[in-house]
Image (tube, helix red, strand yellow):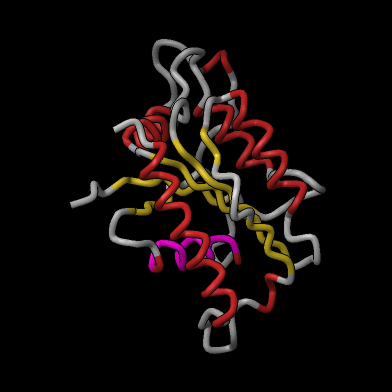
Amino acid sequence: MSKVHRVAVLVGSLRKASINRRLALALAELAPATLQLELVEIGDLPLYNEDIDGDQPPQTYSAFRSKLKAADAVLFVTPEYNRSIPAPMKNAIDVASRPRGQCGFSGKPGAVLSASPGKVGGFGANQHLRQAMVSLDVRLMLVPEAYLGGAGSFFGEDHRLDADIQALLQKFIDAFAQWVQRHSAT
């Protein structure tokens, strides 16, 4: 029997009804039994400041870092803001990567899915996240890449996911499950 891998899911949009949050929840429903996805909230993290991150870091930093360290893998689901990642996502990466030498992402397999109402599908955010993860020793899945344009049409009036997008998400999460299995430390 295959091990169940815990996946920390970071969503770049803070809106409760965001498209990316809905896609992350859809991925959790579509995930094979070998993956257990948990959304790890990033909206309550104070802006990273080394002055407050000493012997007594904010409780939100500690709780966030604990969740990441307990995870076997990480999945980023994000929109694109101004051709890059949203500020809360960058802040979460900064918090997770500190203190130096204790990065909560280090050595974990990961993947990035970006979605945007625009045609480009969050390509800039996806690529910036990939660039940051290289320096944090995250083993990002290379293919399939997921830049989902036209995201405003993914859900119908009944809030159901479009069948073509669901098939694409299924392919993505199945590939990610294989990636995690192959690159997990345990």
Q: Is residue 49 left or right of residue 148?
A: left
- Could you say which is closer to the camera, residue 72 or residue 156? 72
**Relative side of 98 to 35, left or right:** right
Residue visible at 62% across and 52% down in the picture: 78
Q: Residue at x 34, y 31 (%)?
A: 185
Residue 13 visible somewhere in the drawing: no
Q: Identify which residue, 97 or 183, lies in the foreground.
A: 183
Residue, far left: 1
Residue 156, visible in the rendered structure: yes
Residue 149: quadrant of the picture: bottom right
Task: From the top left corner, tell me how far across and down residue 113 is, in percent.
Answer: 60, 54
Q: Give whichever of 1, 4 is nearer the camera.
A: 1
Residue 66: give x, y in percent of width and height.
35, 31
User: Which of the image's four quarters has the C terminus?
Assistant: top left
Horizontally, residue 151 falls left or right of residue 42, namely right
x, y percent for residue 132 = 65, 31
Q: In the image, is residue 12 part of the stretch drawn in magenta?
A: no
Q: Please give the name of the residue rendered at 79% of the width and 60% of the height, measured from the top-left corner.
A: 120
Q: Residue furthest bottom?
A: 158
Residue 147, image quadrant: bottom right
- Residue at image point 41% right, 37% down: 183
Q: Which residues are magenta?
A: 20-29
Q: Main secondary structure of the magenta part?
A: helix
Q: Is residue 151 above or below residue 107?
A: below
